[in-house]
Image (cartoon, helix red, strand yellow):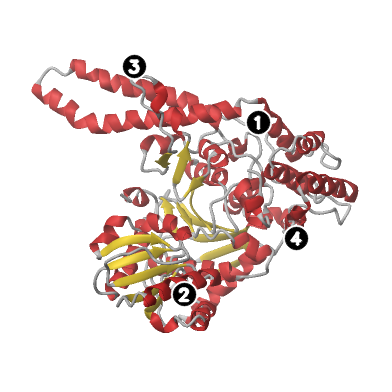
Amino acid sequence: MAAHLSYGRVNLNILREAARKELREFLDKCAGSKAIVWDEYLTGPFGMIAQYSLLKEHEVEKMFTLKSGRLPSADVKNIIFFVRPRLELMDIIAENVFSEDKMHSSRDFHILFVPRRSMLCEQRLKEQGVLGSFINIDEYILDLIPYDGDLLSMEYESAFRECYLENDQTSLYHTAKGLMTLQALYGTIPQIYGKGECARHVANMMLRMKREFAGSQNQILPVFDTLLLLDRNVDLLTPLATQLTYEGLIDEIYGINNGYVKLPPEKFAQKKQGEASKDLPTEPKKLQLNSAEELYAEIRDKNFNAVGAALSKKAKIISAAFEERHNAKTVGEIKQFVSQLPHMQAARSSLANHTSIAELIKDITTSEAFFDNLTVEQEFMTGVDTDKVNTYIEDSIAQKDPLIKILRLVCMQSVCNNGLKQKVFDYYKREILQTYGYEHMLTLNNLEKAGLLKPQTSSRNNYPTIRKTLKLWMEDANEQNPNDISYVYSGYAPLSIRLTQVLARPGWRSIEEVLKMLPGPHFEERQQLPAGLHKKRQQGENRTTLVFFLGGVSYAEIAALRFLSQMEDSGMEYIIATTKLMNGTTWIKSLMDRPESQTP
């Protein structure tokens, strides 16, 4: 199942196995048959670590979603609650436990906090009078979850909001802990670079934790040469832009959650000839997306305009392979053809799926609305008319387009202009509140606090300098055979990835001036390695850098980093880690107050 995690430069299966081992140990603590009551948010991340089969082996017979009221009936000895440390969930657990006690059932209750135990939550259970009902209260440290052979995510959705709106550094502590776990498995990372306030905090915590564990130095040859910690607020622009890679567009339009996407079913219906199409499926088609699927690994990071050609090339190869059966004359040849059949059939069904997805996306990307939106984005990125009210945004508000679309564009204009002129800022604010409702005052306030939508305080706009110095806009980006990371946004090179690229060569000293214009400090730390663990690099061997995005990362940025890893002369391979995989929509949603009353 997880073979694709071990294909890359760093075997991320080691991390997954360590997580599975801990889960087994906890389940074995609760002897006898078990039912797990899940905090719904955790089921996706846990699915990346363990399938139902693993739980079944350890006597898990039933699984329920945590909800108020009575627990469904189950003939089991143990009931285990898997929950995040949230106070509101404790009240539901208390209700569940009370209803069981009334039934006088002799069940054992256990609670597993993910990723950390919380004194406040235990205090709440005590106030509710149920703390004594639990036999085991434990924590399951699930920080970094392997999502692919080069990708780790904490799936901590509120990390950006907590750091920049609530001044809560819990997620940074979890990040530092996650990095310590990683170093315990893959060796100490000798060099740490970082940019931003949060990056500074994480590095400080890591160094402090390392001093505290000074006695237990692990004797593992380091796998990573460098760790780069990047704050999301160093580059607020990139996630707001519409991603133009295949995977990025799937995420923008349909949303990828925990490696799965749900798609409209009608495109995937198997229609037999002559049959009426009245029995079309109504359930969304759920597909898993990762590099275990050969075709997906090949096309996921391409600019969408290059996907059609790749799919038709693949179709020719597959039909040629099926044609081979006519040439198979001898028993040996027929046998060989038959042995390849399962692989060929899987390739054919994979091709059919991706052709359908590409058609769905093409319907959207060829629409006038998509083109108009993209044109405005690209004007902002290149600095065209960012200082006055944009007529497209005005019209979109007048037509009551989805609020998130408006917010993404207005924030983008603000970021590209280092804040909006007070007059423009007030105008947008007034229009949005009058059209969408005054309850969104809180959201606009949040966006301002996070630095996404703000009035201009200084007359100097640094963005054009940053854009020119770091070559963030490349005219005539080659989408078919890219030679620069700017292909992922058809011209715009993500600032976060440019910084990563410059760090590798020629180094950040060459861009000191630009770094000073970006928020937060930049720094470099070295971690001493135990004697004898210094890596002797072979001739031509690549260095490995772990890039950690604090506050979230988009699929287009991941594609740009993979592109850098594959460049022949880069001499660097990148592994990507983040607090959350996100896009502009999910990011803005996380900063909204009352998003549930939101029009979709």
Location of residue 567 with respect to 573 vertically, above or below? above
| Residue highlighted by disc 3 | 273
In the image, 301 versus 408, the foreground residue is 408
Q: Quadrant of residue 515?
A: bottom right
The earlier-in-sequence mark between 1 and 3 is 3
Residue positioned most to the front: 103
The answer to whether the residue labelled 1 contacts the one labelled 2, judged by CB atoms less than 8 Å apart, is no
Q: Taking 352 as reference, is 203 left or right?
A: right
**CB of mark 3 within 8 Å of CB of mark 4?**
no
Labels 2 and 4: the sequence-earlier one: 2
Image depth: mark 2 or mark 3 in front? 2
Helix, strand or loop at mark 4:
helix
Counting other residues with Cα less than 10 Å from the Cα at mark 4, is it few (<14), some (14-19), or many (20 or more)? some
- Residue 492 visible: yes
Residue at the spot of label 2 = 94
Q: CA distance from mark 2 to mark 3?
A: 56 Å
Query: Which numbered disc, 4 or 1, marks the residue that appears first in the sequence?
Result: 1
Write down the quadrant of residue 599 in the picture: top right
Q: Quadrant of the C terminus?
A: top right
Mark-to-mark CA distance, 1 and 2: 49 Å
Q: Nearer the viewer, mark 1 or mark 2?
A: 2
Residue shown at 52% from the left, 38% from the top: 250
Alpha carbon distance from label 4 to label 1: 29 Å
Task: Look at the numbered disc 2 and give the secondary structure of its residue.
Answer: helix
- Residue on which the image places disc 4: 449
Answer above or below: position of 491 versus 316.
below
Q: Nearer the viewer, residue 239 or 111?
A: 111
**Residue 506 in sight:** no
Q: Residues within 10 Å of mark 2 (few under 14, many from 20)?
A: many
Pointer 1: what residue? Answer: 370
Q: CA distance from mark 2 to mark 4?
A: 36 Å
